[in-house]
């Protein structure tokens, strides 16, 4: 497989800046007061205030994967309607500055991509060759980031809340896989089904499914206090 073909298969075509202007330094005038500026600002707000992001960043830090804003995040222009991605080769989270306009959206994207980064940190994920690994992380990211939480889904009245949540996670995981790998829908569905129960029930590091910001805040408080009871033994 030639280089270009391979890059396309890995979903790099969704992030044109990765290949075309990765090393091109932007002029000051270009970078000030632009989408990039706003993206950096919203990222900082997410890292400082979102309980999802704070828990994931703390958990990664205690697993030896300290995450730095300037090194591990990159605000870039992306094609189509993608919001973000995790670039395993550089351990960088890509945030699509041209597609993220609201803080709540930024918070969800940061949480989603940090779950991929957390999985990358704790396990030896073979993102490129093992589709089950990719599927598992996409299921976890959809389940735990708030992507499928009550307020984000208009179609929620069609199902019971619990069943709806599962169907939403399944659908989102499927779409994410199809966006970055050239495999058939049937093949992707089969892989998602095979790993679904195991990965859907793996709630690390939240210890529960954080259905709302309040749930996520509880999970974060529990996480911070996790060593407290053993401190005086
Ligand atoms: Zn994802």
Image (cartoon, rainbow, N blue to C red):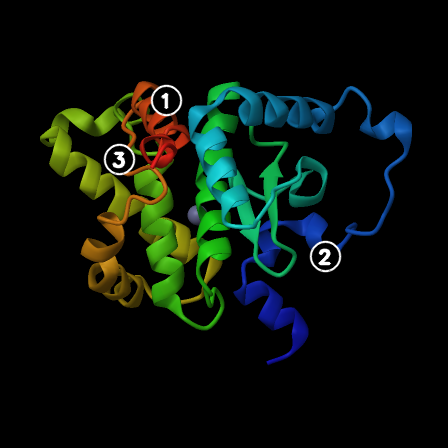
**Which mark, residue 104?**
none
Disc 1 is placed on an element classified as helix
**Between 224 and 73, which is closer to the camera in this rendering?**
224
**Which mark, residue 209?**
3
Observer able to see residue 5 = yes
Nearer-N-terminus badge (3/1): 3
Would you call the spot at circle 2 few (<14 residues within 10 Å), some (14-19), or many (20 or more)? few
Mark closer to the observer (2, 3):
3
- Residue 16: percent from the left, percent from the top? 67, 50
Farthest residue to the bottom: give it: 1
Nearer-N-terminus badge (2/1): 2
**Mark 2 — residue?**
19
Does mark 1's beta carbon lie closer than 8 Å to ligand 1?
no
Mark closer to the observer (2, 1):
1
Disc 3 is placed on an element classified as loop
Q: CA distance from mark 2 to mark 1?
A: 38 Å
**Mark 1 — residue?**
217
- Residue 114: percent from the left, percent from the top? 49, 42
Q: CA distance from mark 2 to mark 3?
A: 36 Å
Q: What residue is rendered at 76% in x and 54% in y? A: 20
> Is residue 88 positioned above or below 171 on the image?
below
Disc 2 is placed on an element classified as helix
- Residue 127: percent from the left, percent from the top? 47, 64
Q: What residue is rendered at 46% in x and 35% in y? A: 111
Q: What residue is rendered at 50% in x and 54% in y? A: 121
Observer able to see residue 109 = no
- Residue 164: percent from the left, percent from the top? 17, 35
Does mark 3's beta carbon lie closer than 8 Å to ligand 1?
no
In the image, taking residue 107 as reference, residue 152 lies left or right, namely left
Nearer-N-terminus badge (2/3): 2
């Amino acid at each position: 497989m030639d280089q270009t073909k391979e890059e396309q298969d890995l979903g790099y075509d969704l992030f044109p800046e990765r290949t075309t202007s990765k090393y091109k330094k932007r002029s000051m005038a270009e970078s000030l007061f632009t989408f990039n500026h706003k993206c950096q600002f919203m990222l900082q707000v997410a890292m400082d205030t979102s309980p999802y992001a704070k828990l994931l960043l703390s958990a990664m830090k205690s697993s030896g994967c300290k995450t730095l804003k300037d090194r591990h995040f990159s605000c870039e222009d992306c094609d189509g309607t993608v919001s973000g991605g995790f670039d395993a080769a550089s351990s960088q989270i890509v945030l699509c500055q041209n597609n993220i306009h609201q803080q709540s959206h930024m918070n969800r994207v940061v949480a989603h991509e940090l779950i991929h980064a957390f999985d990358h940190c704790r396990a030896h994920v073979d993102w490129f060759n093992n589709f089950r690994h990719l599927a598992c992380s996409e299921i976890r990211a959809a389940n735990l980031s708030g992507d499928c939480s009550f307020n984000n889904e208009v179609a929620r009245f069609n199902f019971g809340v619990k069943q709806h949540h599962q169907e939403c996670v399944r659908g989102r995981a499927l779409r994410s896989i199809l966006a970055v790998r050239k495999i058939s829908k049937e093949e992707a569905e089969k892989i998602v089904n095979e790993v679904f129960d195991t990965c859907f029930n793996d709630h690390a590091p939240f210890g529960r499914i954080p259905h709302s910001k309040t749930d996520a805040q509880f999970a974060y408080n529990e996480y911070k206090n996790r060593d407290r009871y053993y401190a005086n033994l």
